[in-house]
């Protein structure tokens, strides 16, 4: 878990070092992507929700990803030029902005009686039934949850560009 003030300090240091003074940093409220580079507003932002849950290393990587977008420009997208800049900054992850919200990194796996799966980052606190089997809660289609180990290797694999 990261202290958000520390994330802000790193962000400002990266902006000072790599970009001009017209760029700013802020937190946003996204829940499904870790960071954003807004070229129109010249603003790099990081989800305060996800940043609070991620470790320092992950948050630093998110910042490098977004700063690389700011340097490479919108036309570069996630292409070779962006990749070159990102690697130069020390970014080792992939092209996703979603961080660890990816299913492959969720430790809780639920399986319904019909074999459908669901993923959660935290242990579900109440009974959940499968929406594919029934759009409303139905006790017959409850998920059976098990916790799996997410190893460093899985984490790396999930963040490697394909
Ligand atoms: Zn990106
Ligand atoms: Zn199902």
Image: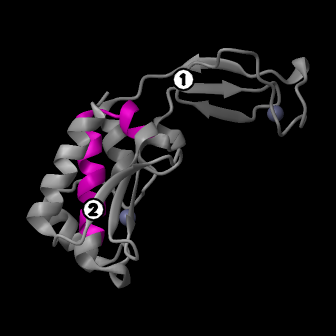
Q: In which quarter of the image is residue 59?
A: top left
C-alpha separation, residue under disc 1 versus residue under disc 2: 33 Å
- Indicate the position of residue 2 as horizontal and vertical percent values: 28, 31
In the image, residue 63 lies in the stretch drawn in magenta? yes
> Which of these two is toward me, 141 or 12?
12
Counting every numbered tag in the picture gives 2
Residue 24 shows which numbered tag?
A: 2
Horizontal and vertical percent position of residue 136? 90, 32
Q: Cβ(mark 2) to ligand 1 < 8 Å? A: no
What residue sits right under mark 1 in the picture?
122
Residue drawn at x 52%, y 29% is 121
Q: Give the range drawn in magenta.
A: 50-69
> Which mark is first along the chain, 2 or 1?
2
Quadrant location, the C terminus: bottom left
Is residue 133 rendered to the left or right of residue 47? right
The image shows residue 134, relative to residue 12, as above or below, that is above
- Kindly indicate the quadrant of the structure image that contains residue 79: bottom left
Residue 8 image position (x, y, % from top left): 24, 45
* Mark 1 vs 2: CB contact within 8 A: no
Tell me which residue sits at (27%, 62%) in the image: 24
Residue 82 shown left or right of residue 126 in the figure: left
Q: Main secondary structure of the magenta part?
A: helix
Q: Quadrant of ligand 2?
A: top right
> Which residue corresponds to the image point at 29% horizontal and 56% vertical from the top-left?
25
For the N terminus, the quadrant is top left
Badge 1: residue crowd in 10 Å (few <14, some 14–19, many ≥20): few
Helix, strand or loop at label 1? It is loop
């Amino acid at each position: 878990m990261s202290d958000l003030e520390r994330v802000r300090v790193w962000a400002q240091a990266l902006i000072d070092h790599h970009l001009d003074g017209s760029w700013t940093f802020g937190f946003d409220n996204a829940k499904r992507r870790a960071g954003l580079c807004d070229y129109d507003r010249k603003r790099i932002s990081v989800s305060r929700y996800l940043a609070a849950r991620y470790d320092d290393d992950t948050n630093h990587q998110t910042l490098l990803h977004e700063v690389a977008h700011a340097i490479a420009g919108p036309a570069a997208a996630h292409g070779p030029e962006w990749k070159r800049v990102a690697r130069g900054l020390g970014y080792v992850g992939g092209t996703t902005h979603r961080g660890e919200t990816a299913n492959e990194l969720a430790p809780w796996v639920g399986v319904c009686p019909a074999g459908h799966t669901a993923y959660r980052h935290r242990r579900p606190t109440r009974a959940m039934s499968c929406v594919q089997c029934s759009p409303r809660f139905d006790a017959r289609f409850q998920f059976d949850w098990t916790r799996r180990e997410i190893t460093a290797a899985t984490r790396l694999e999930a963040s490697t560009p394909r």
